[in-house]
Image (spheres, grey):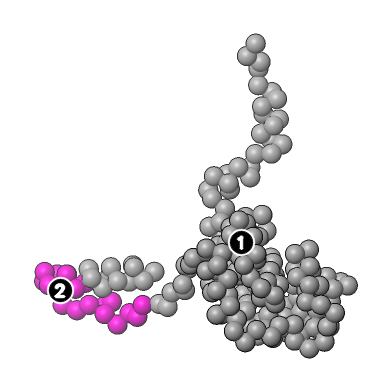
Amino acid sequence: MNREIALLKTLFVKAIEWGYVISNPAANIKLVREQNLTMRVLSVKEEKRLLAAARAPLRPFIVLALYTGMRAGELLELDWQYVNLGSGQLLVRRSKGGEPRRIPLNEPARAALQSLGPQKTGALFHLPNLQRDFRAACEKAGITGFRLHDARHTFASRLVAAGADLITVQQLLGHATLATTVRYAHVKSHEQAVQLLEGDINQTFRSGLPSED
């Protein structure tokens, strides 16, 4: 949208210069605040290298970030009383939007929690040098341009690539509006989207084709 506004402003400036109009009605239109859409998604090979390079307890922290989509701040605030390994769920009490949300635990997330040891009270993580240790692990693994928050992007992008609908992704991430989640819609290419129409109908059509023998 900002490009269109800027173009409109420029057109009126030129129109005034050329004598077509006497004022610029777009002069007071403010540019909208745009979200930073730069996302770095971790590949499976990079994930393996990163986890191999990370020391405990940073390793389970990264796994949970990748497989729950929780923000770093949410993980640092997570208390054992809000983790239920029996039911396979954890509760994020305060999302960025203010609403609590429940996140189901898949096997990697459950294993990461179990690796934290027998302590089942208090905060899960004590990582006073989180960002420094994370950068060191990335450097050791030869991974560039990957921020801790990109683990959340990786989680969402993988969900969409696996076929999860955007409403589900929105709820798991705790986004206040679907507009924030739509950025992940690019994960499925146009080719992949069209191929979703194949399946049984395509097979039925092929089986009805005359033989070339």
- Residue 78 is situated, as x and y percent measured from the top left of the image, at 72, 83
Q: Which residue is mark 1?
A: 49
* Helix, strand or loop: magenta stretch: loop
- In this picture, which residue range is highlighted in magenta? 12-31
User: In the figure, residue 15 lies in which quadrant?
Assistant: bottom left
Q: Of 105 and 133, which appears nearest the observer? A: 133
On whether residue 145 falls in the magenta region, the answer is: no
Q: Is residue 20 left or right of residue 210?
A: left
The correct choice, above or below, for 199 with respect to 187 in the image is above
Q: Of 104 and 112, which appears nearest the observer? A: 112
Element carrying mark 2: helix
Residue that lies at the very extreme toward the right in this rendered image: 86
Q: Which residue is mark 2?
A: 16
Q: Of 105 and 147, which appears nearest the observer? A: 147
User: In the figure, residue 41 lies in which quadrant?
Assistant: bottom right
Residue beneath the point at 26% across and 73% down: 9
Residue beneath the point at 71% across and 72% down: 60
Tag 1: Cα neighbours inside 10 Å, few (<14), some, or many (≥20)? Answer: some
- Residue 6 is situated, as x and y percent measured from the top left of the image, at 29, 71
